Image: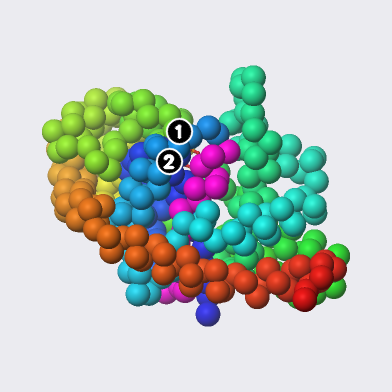
Amino acid sequence: ANRIVSGIKPSGDLNIGGYGGALSQFIQLQQDYDCFFFIPDLHAITVPQPPDVLQRRTRDIAALYLAAGIDPGKSVLFLQSQVPAHAELGYLLQTLAVMGELGRMTQYKDKSDGKSSVSSALFTYPVLMAADVLLYRTTHVPVGDDQLQHLELARDLARRFNQRFGVELFLAPEPIIGMIGSRIMGLDDPSAKMSKSNPNTNSCVMLMDSPELIRRKFAKAVTDSEGIVRYDWESKPAVSNLVEIYAVFSGLSVEEIERRYDGKGYSSFKSELVDVVIEKLVPLQARYHEWIGSPELDRILKEGAQRAAAEAAPVLAEAKRAMGFASF
Ligand code: AQP
Protein backbone atom coordinates (compact mmCIF):
# COMPACT_ATOMS: atom_id res chain seq x y z
CA ALA A 1 0.00 0.00 0.00
CA ASN A 2 1.09 3.57 -0.51
CA ARG A 3 2.46 4.90 2.69
CA ILE A 4 3.04 8.36 4.14
CA VAL A 5 5.13 9.63 7.04
CA SER A 6 4.77 13.22 8.18
CA GLY A 7 4.86 15.34 11.30
CA ILE A 8 4.85 18.76 12.92
CA LYS A 9 7.72 19.83 15.16
CA PRO A 10 6.78 20.92 18.68
CA SER A 11 8.95 24.01 18.29
CA GLY A 12 6.21 26.56 18.85
CA ASP A 13 2.47 26.85 19.24
CA LEU A 14 0.57 25.99 16.10
CA ASN A 15 -0.72 28.63 13.72
CA ILE A 16 -2.92 28.35 10.64
CA GLY A 17 0.23 27.80 8.52
CA GLY A 18 0.78 24.45 10.19
CA TYR A 19 -2.93 23.74 9.87
CA GLY A 20 -2.95 24.43 6.12
CA GLY A 21 0.44 22.90 5.38
CA ALA A 22 0.12 19.85 7.58
CA LEU A 23 -2.99 19.08 9.67
CA SER A 24 -5.66 19.72 7.03
CA GLN A 25 -3.62 17.76 4.48
CA PHE A 26 -3.12 14.86 6.90
CA ILE A 27 -6.87 14.51 7.21
CA GLN A 28 -7.26 14.23 3.45
CA LEU A 29 -4.28 11.92 2.97
CA GLN A 30 -5.46 9.60 5.69
CA GLN A 31 -8.33 8.52 3.43
CA ASP A 32 -6.06 7.21 0.67
CA TYR A 33 -2.77 6.25 2.31
CA ASP A 34 -1.44 4.10 5.07
CA CYS A 35 -0.29 6.95 7.35
CA PHE A 36 2.31 7.33 10.06
CA PHE A 37 1.87 10.71 11.74
CA PHE A 38 4.42 11.56 14.35
CA ILE A 39 5.59 14.43 16.48
CA PRO A 40 9.26 15.10 15.73
CA ASP A 41 10.29 16.08 19.23
CA LEU A 42 13.89 15.06 18.49
CA HIS A 43 13.87 17.62 15.68
CA ALA A 44 12.47 20.33 17.94
CA ILE A 45 15.56 20.21 20.17
CA THR A 46 17.91 21.08 17.32
CA VAL A 47 17.31 24.56 18.73
CA PRO A 48 17.14 24.88 22.55
CA GLN A 49 13.71 24.11 24.05
CA PRO A 50 12.93 24.52 27.76
CA PRO A 51 12.00 20.99 28.92
CA ASP A 52 8.65 21.97 30.47
CA VAL A 53 7.64 23.84 27.32
CA LEU A 54 8.68 20.95 25.09
CA GLN A 55 6.63 18.57 27.17
CA ARG A 56 3.52 20.76 27.06
CA ARG A 57 3.80 21.47 23.34
CA THR A 58 4.33 17.87 22.40
CA ARG A 59 1.13 16.82 24.12
CA ASP A 60 -0.64 19.88 22.73
CA ILE A 61 0.20 18.98 19.17
CA ALA A 62 -0.88 15.39 19.71
CA ALA A 63 -4.23 16.66 20.98
CA LEU A 64 -4.52 18.91 17.94
CA TYR A 65 -3.84 16.02 15.54
CA LEU A 66 -6.75 14.17 17.09
CA ALA A 67 -8.95 17.28 17.29
CA ALA A 68 -8.33 17.93 13.60
CA GLY A 69 -9.59 14.46 12.75
CA ILE A 70 -6.70 12.04 12.66
CA ASP A 71 -8.22 8.66 13.34
CA PRO A 72 -5.96 6.55 15.55
CA GLY A 73 -7.82 3.44 14.42
CA LYS A 74 -6.64 4.10 10.89
CA SER A 75 -3.37 6.02 11.17
CA VAL A 76 -0.44 5.46 13.49
CA LEU A 77 0.14 8.43 15.81
CA PHE A 78 3.29 8.57 17.92
CA LEU A 79 6.16 10.60 19.35
CA GLN A 80 9.50 10.31 17.58
CA SER A 81 11.44 10.10 20.85
CA GLN A 82 9.45 7.02 21.86
CA VAL A 83 10.68 5.02 18.89
CA PRO A 84 14.47 4.81 19.34
CA ALA A 85 14.93 3.34 15.86
CA HIS A 86 14.65 6.90 14.44
CA ALA A 87 17.74 8.12 16.28
CA GLU A 88 19.57 4.89 15.59
CA LEU A 89 18.96 4.87 11.84
CA GLY A 90 19.67 8.62 11.83
CA TYR A 91 23.14 7.89 13.18
CA LEU A 92 23.77 5.11 10.68
CA LEU A 93 22.76 7.38 7.80
CA GLN A 94 25.06 10.13 9.07
CA THR A 95 27.93 7.90 8.08
CA LEU A 96 26.70 8.10 4.47
CA ALA A 97 25.79 11.78 4.34
CA VAL A 98 28.66 14.15 3.63
CA MET A 99 29.37 17.59 5.08
CA GLY A 100 29.18 19.37 1.72
CA GLU A 101 25.64 18.28 0.90
CA LEU A 102 24.39 19.12 4.39
CA GLY A 103 26.06 22.52 4.22
CA ARG A 104 24.06 23.28 1.07
CA MET A 105 20.69 22.85 2.78
CA THR A 106 18.96 26.21 2.62
CA GLN A 107 16.98 25.63 5.81
CA TYR A 108 20.25 25.09 7.68
CA LYS A 109 21.68 28.23 6.16
CA ASP A 110 18.58 30.25 7.10
CA LYS A 111 18.36 28.90 10.63
CA SER A 112 22.05 29.28 11.40
CA ASP A 113 22.40 32.67 9.73
CA GLY A 114 23.64 35.30 12.16
CA LYS A 115 23.72 32.88 15.14
CA SER A 116 26.93 32.71 17.13
CA SER A 117 26.27 29.19 18.32
CA VAL A 118 24.43 26.49 16.39
CA SER A 119 24.04 22.86 17.49
CA SER A 120 25.59 20.11 15.40
CA ALA A 121 22.13 18.51 15.41
CA LEU A 122 20.74 21.44 13.42
CA PHE A 123 23.34 20.57 10.80
CA THR A 124 22.47 16.86 10.72
CA TYR A 125 18.70 17.47 10.99
CA PRO A 126 17.99 16.43 7.37
CA VAL A 127 19.66 13.07 7.98
CA LEU A 128 17.38 12.34 10.91
CA MET A 129 14.47 13.39 8.71
CA ALA A 130 15.68 10.90 6.09
CA ALA A 131 15.68 8.22 8.79
CA ASP A 132 12.10 9.19 9.75
CA VAL A 133 10.79 8.41 6.29
CA LEU A 134 13.10 5.59 5.21
CA LEU A 135 12.47 3.60 8.37
CA TYR A 136 8.88 2.90 7.33
CA ARG A 137 9.68 2.28 3.65
CA THR A 138 7.51 5.28 2.93
CA THR A 139 6.35 5.71 -0.67
CA HIS A 140 5.18 9.33 -0.47
CA VAL A 141 5.93 12.39 1.63
CA PRO A 142 3.75 15.52 1.55
CA VAL A 143 6.11 18.50 1.51
CA GLY A 144 6.00 22.25 1.34
CA ASP A 145 8.47 24.05 -0.95
CA ASP A 146 10.89 24.45 1.94
CA GLN A 147 11.15 20.71 2.59
CA LEU A 148 11.74 19.52 -0.99
CA GLN A 149 15.50 19.77 -0.66
CA HIS A 150 15.42 17.61 2.48
CA LEU A 151 13.31 15.00 0.75
CA GLU A 152 15.74 14.95 -2.16
CA LEU A 153 18.50 14.18 0.33
CA ALA A 154 16.43 11.34 1.81
CA ARG A 155 16.02 9.90 -1.69
CA ASP A 156 19.78 10.17 -2.30
CA LEU A 157 20.59 8.49 0.99
CA ALA A 158 18.15 5.65 0.25
CA ARG A 159 19.81 4.97 -3.10
CA ARG A 160 23.31 5.42 -1.68
CA PHE A 161 22.66 2.93 1.10
CA ASN A 162 21.16 0.33 -1.22
CA GLN A 163 24.01 0.67 -3.67
CA ARG A 164 26.82 0.67 -1.17
CA PHE A 165 25.56 -2.34 0.74
CA GLY A 166 24.02 -4.23 -2.17
CA VAL A 167 20.46 -4.38 -0.84
CA GLU A 168 17.03 -3.29 -2.01
CA LEU A 169 16.05 -2.09 1.43
CA PHE A 170 15.15 1.57 1.29
CA LEU A 171 12.60 3.14 -1.05
CA ALA A 172 13.15 6.61 -2.49
CA PRO A 173 9.86 8.29 -1.55
CA GLU A 174 8.03 10.58 -3.97
CA PRO A 175 7.05 14.08 -2.88
CA ILE A 176 3.40 15.09 -2.82
CA ILE A 177 3.49 18.76 -3.67
CA GLY A 178 1.11 21.55 -4.46
CA MET A 179 -1.70 20.61 -2.11
CA ILE A 180 -3.73 23.62 -1.15
CA GLY A 181 -2.41 25.15 2.06
CA SER A 182 1.23 24.31 1.34
CA ARG A 183 2.08 27.96 1.30
CA ILE A 184 0.70 30.18 4.02
CA MET A 185 2.60 33.39 4.51
CA GLY A 186 2.60 36.05 7.21
CA LEU A 187 -0.48 38.29 7.26
CA ASP A 188 1.75 41.35 7.56
CA ASP A 189 4.32 40.23 4.99
CA PRO A 190 3.48 37.76 2.21
CA SER A 191 7.16 37.18 1.47
CA ALA A 192 7.79 35.48 4.83
CA LYS A 193 6.32 32.10 5.80
CA MET A 194 3.94 32.10 8.74
CA SER A 195 6.31 30.33 11.10
CA LYS A 196 5.75 28.98 14.58
CA SER A 197 9.20 29.84 15.89
CA ASN A 198 8.66 33.45 14.87
CA PRO A 199 5.29 34.33 16.37
CA ASN A 200 5.04 38.00 15.48
CA THR A 201 1.54 38.60 16.77
CA ASN A 202 0.13 40.34 13.74
CA SER A 203 1.71 37.96 11.31
CA CYS A 204 0.29 34.69 12.65
CA VAL A 205 -3.20 33.50 13.48
CA MET A 206 -2.76 30.90 16.18
CA LEU A 207 -5.03 27.85 16.25
CA MET A 208 -6.00 28.77 19.81
CA ASP A 209 -6.78 32.45 19.14
CA SER A 210 -10.20 33.71 20.21
CA PRO A 211 -12.69 34.74 17.50
CA GLU A 212 -12.23 38.42 18.42
CA LEU A 213 -8.48 38.17 18.09
CA ILE A 214 -8.76 36.32 14.76
CA ARG A 215 -11.04 39.08 13.46
CA ARG A 216 -8.62 41.78 14.58
CA LYS A 217 -5.60 40.08 13.00
CA PHE A 218 -7.32 39.61 9.64
CA ALA A 219 -8.57 43.19 9.72
CA LYS A 220 -4.92 44.28 9.82
CA ALA A 221 -3.77 41.82 7.14
CA VAL A 222 -2.11 43.51 4.19
CA THR A 223 -3.77 43.38 0.74
CA ASP A 224 -3.04 45.59 -2.26
CA SER A 225 -4.65 48.59 -3.92
CA GLU A 226 -6.25 46.73 -6.84
CA GLY A 227 -9.44 45.68 -5.07
CA ILE A 228 -9.79 42.43 -7.06
CA VAL A 229 -9.86 38.99 -5.40
CA ARG A 230 -7.56 37.00 -7.66
CA TYR A 231 -5.11 34.16 -6.98
CA ASP A 232 -1.78 35.09 -8.50
CA TRP A 233 1.28 34.72 -6.28
CA GLU A 234 3.51 36.62 -8.71
CA SER A 235 1.66 39.89 -8.83
CA LYS A 236 -0.74 39.63 -5.85
CA PRO A 237 1.03 37.71 -3.06
CA ALA A 238 -0.90 39.22 -0.14
CA VAL A 239 -4.35 38.56 -1.64
CA SER A 240 -3.28 35.13 -2.92
CA ASN A 241 -2.25 34.24 0.61
CA LEU A 242 -5.71 35.18 1.90
CA VAL A 243 -7.37 33.18 -0.91
CA GLU A 244 -5.20 30.19 0.02
CA ILE A 245 -6.29 30.46 3.65
CA TYR A 246 -9.91 30.80 2.53
CA ALA A 247 -9.56 27.65 0.43
CA VAL A 248 -8.06 25.65 3.30
CA PHE A 249 -10.79 26.59 5.74
CA SER A 250 -13.79 26.54 3.41
CA GLY A 251 -12.93 23.53 1.29
CA LEU A 252 -13.74 25.64 -1.81
CA SER A 253 -11.38 25.73 -4.76
CA VAL A 254 -9.44 28.85 -5.65
CA GLU A 255 -11.62 29.31 -8.77
CA GLU A 256 -14.81 29.07 -6.72
CA ILE A 257 -13.49 31.73 -4.37
CA GLU A 258 -12.49 34.04 -7.22
CA ARG A 259 -15.95 33.62 -8.74
CA ARG A 260 -17.72 34.21 -5.45
CA TYR A 261 -15.93 37.58 -4.96
CA ASP A 262 -15.99 38.68 -8.57
CA GLY A 263 -16.86 42.39 -8.60
CA LYS A 264 -16.83 42.62 -4.81
CA GLY A 265 -14.09 44.42 -2.90
CA TYR A 266 -11.78 43.21 -0.18
CA SER A 267 -13.98 44.15 2.73
CA SER A 268 -16.68 41.50 2.24
CA PHE A 269 -14.00 38.99 1.21
CA LYS A 270 -12.00 39.60 4.38
CA SER A 271 -15.00 39.54 6.64
CA GLU A 272 -16.27 36.23 5.20
CA LEU A 273 -12.75 34.83 5.33
CA VAL A 274 -12.79 35.47 9.07
CA ASP A 275 -16.16 33.66 9.29
CA VAL A 276 -14.89 30.51 7.57
CA VAL A 277 -11.75 30.43 9.71
CA ILE A 278 -13.71 30.85 12.94
CA GLU A 279 -16.28 28.28 11.87
CA LYS A 280 -13.51 25.66 11.66
CA LEU A 281 -11.37 26.77 14.58
CA VAL A 282 -14.00 27.10 17.29
CA PRO A 283 -15.06 23.42 17.17
CA LEU A 284 -11.42 22.38 16.72
CA GLN A 285 -10.57 24.24 19.93
CA ALA A 286 -13.43 22.53 21.77
CA ARG A 287 -12.25 19.09 20.65
CA TYR A 288 -8.68 20.02 21.58
CA HIS A 289 -9.79 20.83 25.13
CA GLU A 290 -11.49 17.44 25.40
CA TRP A 291 -8.41 15.57 24.19
CA ILE A 292 -5.85 17.48 26.22
CA GLY A 293 -7.61 16.59 29.46
CA SER A 294 -8.04 12.95 28.56
CA PRO A 295 -5.80 10.03 29.58
CA GLU A 296 -6.99 8.43 26.33
CA LEU A 297 -4.50 10.74 24.56
CA ASP A 298 -1.55 9.13 26.34
CA ARG A 299 -2.91 5.67 25.67
CA ILE A 300 -3.17 6.40 21.93
CA LEU A 301 0.40 7.73 21.82
CA LYS A 302 1.71 4.72 23.69
CA GLU A 303 -0.05 2.28 21.43
CA GLY A 304 1.07 4.28 18.38
CA ALA A 305 4.70 4.05 19.48
CA GLN A 306 4.36 0.29 19.83
CA ARG A 307 2.87 -0.05 16.35
CA ALA A 308 5.55 2.22 14.85
CA ALA A 309 8.37 0.40 16.63
CA ALA A 310 7.09 -2.93 15.35
CA GLU A 311 7.13 -1.63 11.77
CA ALA A 312 10.55 -0.03 12.14
CA ALA A 313 12.34 -2.93 13.86
CA PRO A 314 12.82 -5.29 10.88
CA VAL A 315 13.94 -2.44 8.60
CA LEU A 316 16.52 -1.24 11.12
CA ALA A 317 17.68 -4.81 11.73
CA GLU A 318 18.14 -5.37 8.01
CA ALA A 319 20.07 -2.08 7.67
CA LYS A 320 22.42 -3.10 10.48
CA ARG A 321 22.87 -6.57 9.10
CA ALA A 322 23.70 -5.15 5.66
CA MET A 323 26.27 -2.80 7.20
CA GLY A 324 28.03 -5.64 8.93
CA PHE A 325 26.88 -5.34 12.51
CA ALA A 326 26.58 -8.48 14.55
CA SER A 327 23.05 -9.79 14.68
CA PHE A 328 22.96 -12.38 17.45
N1 AQP B 1 3.27 28.73 6.90
C1 AQP B 1 3.15 27.49 6.44
N2 AQP B 1 2.50 27.25 5.29
C2 AQP B 1 2.38 26.00 4.82
N3 AQP B 1 2.89 24.92 5.42
C3 AQP B 1 3.55 25.12 6.57
N4 AQP B 1 4.15 24.26 7.39
C4 AQP B 1 4.66 24.94 8.45
N5 AQP B 1 4.40 26.26 8.31
C5 AQP B 1 3.71 26.39 7.15
C6 AQP B 1 4.24 22.84 7.12
O1 AQP B 1 3.91 22.11 8.26
C7 AQP B 1 4.70 20.94 8.29
C8 AQP B 1 5.31 20.79 9.63
O2 AQP B 1 6.25 21.79 9.81
P1 AQP B 1 7.36 21.62 10.88
O3 AQP B 1 6.81 21.92 12.19
O4 AQP B 1 8.02 20.32 10.81
O5 AQP B 1 8.49 22.60 10.44
P2 AQP B 1 8.58 23.98 9.78
O6 AQP B 1 8.10 23.93 8.40
O7 AQP B 1 10.01 24.36 9.96
O8 AQP B 1 7.63 24.90 10.64
P3 AQP B 1 7.85 26.29 11.27
O9 AQP B 1 6.52 26.76 11.66
O10 AQP B 1 8.64 27.20 10.38
O11 AQP B 1 8.63 25.98 12.58
P4 AQP B 1 10.11 26.28 12.95
O12 AQP B 1 10.24 27.76 12.77
O13 AQP B 1 10.28 25.83 14.36
O14 AQP B 1 10.98 25.52 12.01
C9 AQP B 1 5.72 21.01 7.17
O15 AQP B 1 5.30 20.17 6.11
C10 AQP B 1 5.68 22.44 6.78
O16 AQP B 1 5.97 22.59 5.39
Would you say 3 lies left or right of 156 here?
left
Would you say 199 lies left or right of 108 here?
left
Bounds of the magenta segment:
31-46
Which x, y percent locates residue 19? Answer: 35, 49
Q: Amino acid at mark 1?
A: Pro
Q: Is residue 35 magenta?
A: yes
> Compared to 70, does 100 lie above or below?
above
Residue 36 vs residue 1, the one in the foreground: 36
Marks 1 and 2 in Cβ contact (< 8 Å): yes
Where on the picture, by quarter, is residue 309? Answer: bottom right
The residue lying at 39 percent from left, 37 percent from top is: 53
Q: Amino acid at mark 2?
A: Leu
Q: Residue furthest bottom?
A: 1
Residue picked out by circle 1? 50
Would you say 124 lies left or right of 253 here?
right
Q: Secondary structure at mark 2?
A: helix
Q: Is residue 222 magenta?
A: no
